[in-house]
Image: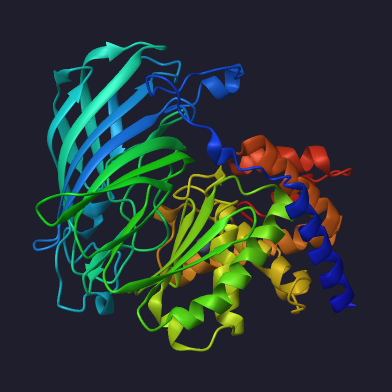
């Protein structure tokens, strides 16, 4: 039964590949003066700020590998699409989570050389050409505007900044001359009813960002390799033993970067997506097994939910403690210990399937991961179980294995321990979807998720948005079911 199912599924995936239904949207380029234009968007979409269609980061990044310092220059072009008059702008400066030993989210064993601080400081900020003042508050910074910004006005923010990369095996840190640079640059926060500012949290992913376009000029010493969100359009060798990479990434929720030393790259073209796997030297053979599964996962999710719109997908194995994997648009970090055992085993297959599912639930459909972490985590796990069940013939959990009364309403600051976080975002999130499946049937759940992707792609969805969609798609009264999951 499972075999037959698998064959059928592979055939359908093959058909999709032949028909080229998921033509990469990535080919959309910014034309002319490099400024994206707003076109044909309805009122509701237009009120988003910073607007996904109208926000463009140009960054110059210089990495000093002797001192683990990044010299950054960011020019952010956007427009006040918030329909409010703005007197300040808020940014997330995630490197400041690593400033002191008491507050760092990285576990003790990640600090292989004792505690080493990490931070990001502004040295100069200009808004529309005028120098402005700013207050740094933990992982957030408030930029005070000299003049009010009216709705519809253009905004150009220029920031000179310096960041220190801590010696820590984590999603922001460095070890063995490898640099894991997740959320390393100042990022403009989302303004909804209020600002969705980041705060430091010992667990979870304290982020909420809109998608944007990026053009990055990265300057690194010769002898390092680069794995980044988007596409390297040029590589220039400088005289002083350094290399410049020009990198372009469009419609991405974040720009992430790994600067690697003594790594091998394994590349496979799936017909639609170029898969790149970066492993430390001598682990290339492991990459061959992983690349096939990654292609199957990308194809399966594309078939079930909707196409993967980027030209490529990258998996980077890095020294990392505290979690198994970390998702970014078009790129995931996986802990290098993953390579120590023979792939596949059940745990590593699940981790890979979970992290790849985040390309749909986190990257394409965003959510406020501080306020509603269950939205992306629960769906990434449920999707992974579906892949393992339908393609790999593994047994998926059943609704009966989960409680049906987990309180999903908790935000990160209401959660006090890592086990409580896992219970809410992961176990609770999975429980919701397995119970919904028991209530409505699997096909209806896939239908709901296809609608969820179609309606919220490149946007941020809330629990309320999702519930409204479930109410609309389910041909039955859902109030009793939905109310159980909040403040039970
Ligand atoms: Zn996850």
Q: Decide if residue 223 is on the left or right side of residue 190.
A: left
State which quadrant residue 265 falls in.
bottom left
Pinpoint residue 41: horizontal percent, then vertical percent. Answer: 59, 19
In-front residue for pair 439/318 = 318
State which quadrant residue 301 falls in.
bottom right
In this picture, is 249 found above or below 177?
above
Q: How many marks?
A: 0
What residue lies at 45% left-to-right and 28% top-to-bottom? 30
What residue lies at 88% left-to-right and 44% top-to-bottom? 476
Pinpoint residue 397: horizontal percent, then vertical percent. Answer: 73, 74
In-front residue for pair 481/281 = 281
Q: Decide if residue 357 is on the left or right side of residue 447.
A: left
In this picture, is 329 found above or below 156?
below
In-front residue for pair 217/53 = 217
- Residue 364 visible? The answer is yes
Q: Quadrant of the N terminus?
A: bottom right
- Residue 459 visible? The answer is no
In this picture, is 362 found above or below 100?
above
Pinpoint residue 45: horizontal percent, then vertical percent. Answer: 57, 24
In-front residue for pair 293/424 = 293
Q: Quadrant of the C terminus?
A: bottom right
Pinpoint residue 330: horizontal percent, then vertical percent. Answer: 49, 53
Judged from this view, the residue extending furthest toward the bottom is: 341
Colour basis: rainbow
What residue lies at 35% left-to-right and 40% top-to-bottom? 197
What residue lies at 18% left-to-right and 67% top-to-bottom? 101
Q: Decide if residue 34 is on the left or right side of residue 251.
A: left
């Amino acid at each position: 039964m499972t075999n037959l199912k698998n064959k059928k599924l592979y055939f359908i995936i093959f058909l999709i590949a032949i028909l080229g239904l998921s033509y990469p949207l990535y080919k959309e380029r910014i034309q002319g003066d490099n400024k994206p234009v707003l076109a044909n968007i309805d009122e509701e979409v237009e009120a988003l700020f910073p607007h996904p269609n109208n926000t463009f980061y140009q960054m110059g990044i210089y990495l000093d590998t002797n001192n683990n310092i990044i010299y950054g220059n960011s020019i952010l072009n956007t427009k006040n699409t918030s329909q409010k008059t703005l007197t300040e702008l808020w940014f997330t400066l995630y490197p400041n989570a690593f400033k002191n030993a008491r507050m760092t989210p990285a576990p003790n064993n990640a600090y292989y050389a004792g505690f080493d601080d990490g931070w990001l400081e502004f040295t100069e900020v200009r808004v529309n050409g005028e120098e402005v003042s700013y207050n740094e508050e933990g992982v957030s910074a408030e930029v005070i505007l000299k003049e009010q910004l009216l709705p519809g006005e253009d905004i150009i923010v220029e920031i000179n900044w310096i960041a220190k990369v801590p010696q820590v095996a984590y999603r922001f840190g460095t070890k063995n001359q490898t640099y894991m640079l997740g959320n390393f640059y100042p990022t403009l926060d989302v303004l909804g009813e209020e600002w969705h500012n980041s705060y430091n949290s010992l667990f979870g992913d304290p982020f909420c960002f809109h998608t944007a376009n990026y053009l990055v000029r990265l300057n690194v010493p010769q002898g390092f390799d680069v794995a980044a969100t988007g596409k390297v359009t040029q590589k220039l060798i400088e005289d002083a033993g350094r290399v410049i990479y020009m990198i372009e990434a469009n419609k991405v929720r974040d720009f992430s970067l790994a600067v690697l030393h003594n790594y091998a790259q394994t590349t496979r073209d799936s017909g639609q997506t170029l898969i790149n796997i970066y492993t430390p030297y001598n682990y290339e053979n492991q990459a061959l097994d992983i690349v096939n599964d990654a292609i199957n996962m990308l194809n399966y999710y594309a078939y079930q939910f909707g196409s993967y719109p980027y030209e490529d997908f990258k998996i980077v194995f890095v020294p990392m403690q505290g979690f198994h994997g970390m998702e970014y648009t078009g790129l995931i970090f996986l802990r290098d210990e993953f390579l120590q055992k023979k792939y596949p085993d059940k745990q590593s297959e699940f981790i890979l399937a979970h992290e790849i599912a985040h390309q749909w639930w986190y990257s394409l459909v965003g959510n406020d991961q501080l306020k509603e972490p269950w939205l992306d985590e629960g769906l990434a796990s449920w999707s992974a179980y579906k892949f393992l069940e339908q393609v790999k013939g593994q047994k998926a959990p059943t609704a009966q294995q989960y409680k049906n009364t987990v309180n999903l309403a908790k935000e990160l600051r209401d959660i006090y321990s890592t086990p409580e976080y896992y219970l809410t975002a992961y176990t609770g999130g999975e429980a919701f979807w397995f119970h919904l499946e028991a209530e409505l049937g699997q096909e209806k759940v896939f239908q709901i998720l296809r609608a969820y992707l179609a309606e919220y792609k490149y946007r941020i969805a809330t629990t309320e948005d999702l519930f409204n969609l479930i109410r609309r798609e389910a041909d039955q009264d859902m109030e009793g079911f939905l109310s159980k999951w909040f403040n039970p």
